[in-house]
Amino acid sequence: MSAIPRPAHLEGLERYEAGMSLDEFERSSGLARVYKLASNENPLGPSPKALAAAALALQRIHLYPDGPGTKLREALAARLGVSGSQVAIGNGSTDLIDLLARSFLGPDDEGLTGSAAFARFRQCVAARNHHARLVPMKDHGLDVEALAAAITPRTRLLFLPNPNNPTGTWNTAAEVDALLARLPAGALLILDEAYREFAEEQPGYPDGLALVKAGAPVVVLRTFSKAYGLAGLRVGYAIAAPEVVSAIDTVREPFNTNLVGQAAALAALEDEAHLRATIELNRAERTRVAAALAARGLRVLPSLANFLCVETSPRAGADVFKALLGHGVIVRPLGPYGMPGFLRVSIGNADENTAFLAALDEVVAG
């Protein structure tokens, strides 16, 4: 039987490589204790209220979920002060990135973002029409001036992750306003705020929601995966003009968020105490770990997220990653982002972070 040729339109497309899974490493390593600091997950886990709601929802998984996620949309709309027609629900915010590319990019339209911005932006645009354009970063952050200069009449979507994954860097409200002023008619600025709960108290951090309410051509993406601790249930949402939400709803899968995820997200919204505990733990531990790394002579990029981007040069980040695996610590090497001398390290709880620092000392000494 002859081999089936790879479809021509897939040539040049890259596959998203997720961080090493805990199950995979535990099976292969034989280590008694493993610390996963690779995927920016919540070390406190989900809210107990979300867990209870998920358990209750399991009794109904023989039924299809509500396709539009009506209750969750309405709850989000009420909390955010917008109409339900301005909220779209996705299978994580990554689903919404793909839906935006499918909705708004014609054959000759282009999507624009930074060269070391979240990989799914360029991957979704490339899969749609191969017209993803990457702009060099500045000090490992999104260069707003360079992005604005790179805009052409074909630019339809401009992706600005804030804070950015994997660098943790961010752009100010003034920078976002300046970029919007140069956005052509018909184009959309996608503000990816997956880590906003960890960043919103920073002076000068943009209020994407206010921009949407003011009628700016902005789509705000948010998620329940990070601060709310529901990464395994895949629930994200977008806030945008009703016309944008309508376009997303036109192309999305009929049941793109599951019944358990919708129920857990709805309950997680109500647990302000758990969210606050998550934010406070992250702030304290991020400060401690950053200072500890700096004390070891390592450069740490400024971060408003729940991870740190650490320079390992002259040693390759991939080599340090492999050495840390031998000590039961999983982090994320950044070679695929054009940053071979860097690692991304999630902020865990105090014990996990201390274990990482101890393992790093062993690796450096070795």
Image (cartoon, rainbow, N blue to C red):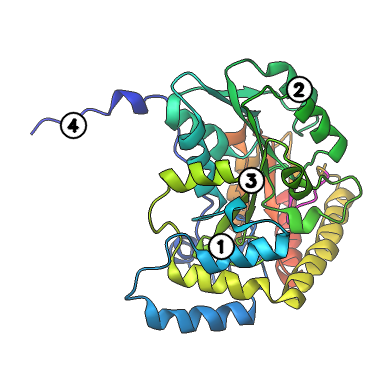
Residue type, mark 1 in image: Ala
The answer to whether mark 3 and mark 1 are in CB contact below 8 A is no
For image coordinates 70% across by 77% down, the residue present is 271
| Mark found first going from the N terminus, 2 or 4 | 4
Which SS type dominates the magenta stretch? loop
| Residue annotated with mark 4 | 4
In this rendering, which labeled residue sits more in front, label 4 or label 3?
Answer: 3
Residue type, mark 4 in image: Ile
Q: Is residue 7 magenta?
A: no
Residue type, mark 2 in image: Arg
Circle 3 packing at 10 Å, graded few (<14), some (14-19), many (20+), is: many
How far is mark 2 from mark 1, CA to CA? 35 Å
In this rendering, which labeled residue sits more in front, label 3 or label 2?
Answer: 3
| Residue annotated with mark 3 | 240
Instruction: Name the image quarter holding the N terminus.
Output: top left
Q: Is residue 129 above or below residue 279?
A: above
Specify whether 174 is left or right of 55.
right
The answer to whether mark 1 and mark 4 are in CB contact below 8 A is no
| Mark found first going from the N terminus, 1 or 4 | 4
| Mark found first going from the N terminus, 4 or 3 | 4
- Mark seen at residue 231: 1
How far is mark 2 from mark 4, CA to CA? 46 Å
| Mark found first going from the N terminus, 3 or 1 | 1
Camera-nearest residue between 21 and 60 = 60
| Residue annotated with mark 2 | 182
In this rendering, which labeled residue sits more in front, label 3 or label 1?
Answer: 3
The stretch of residues the image draws in magenta is: 302-308
Camera-nearest residue between 354 and 156 = 156
Q: Position of residue 57 (x, y in %)?
A: 45, 79
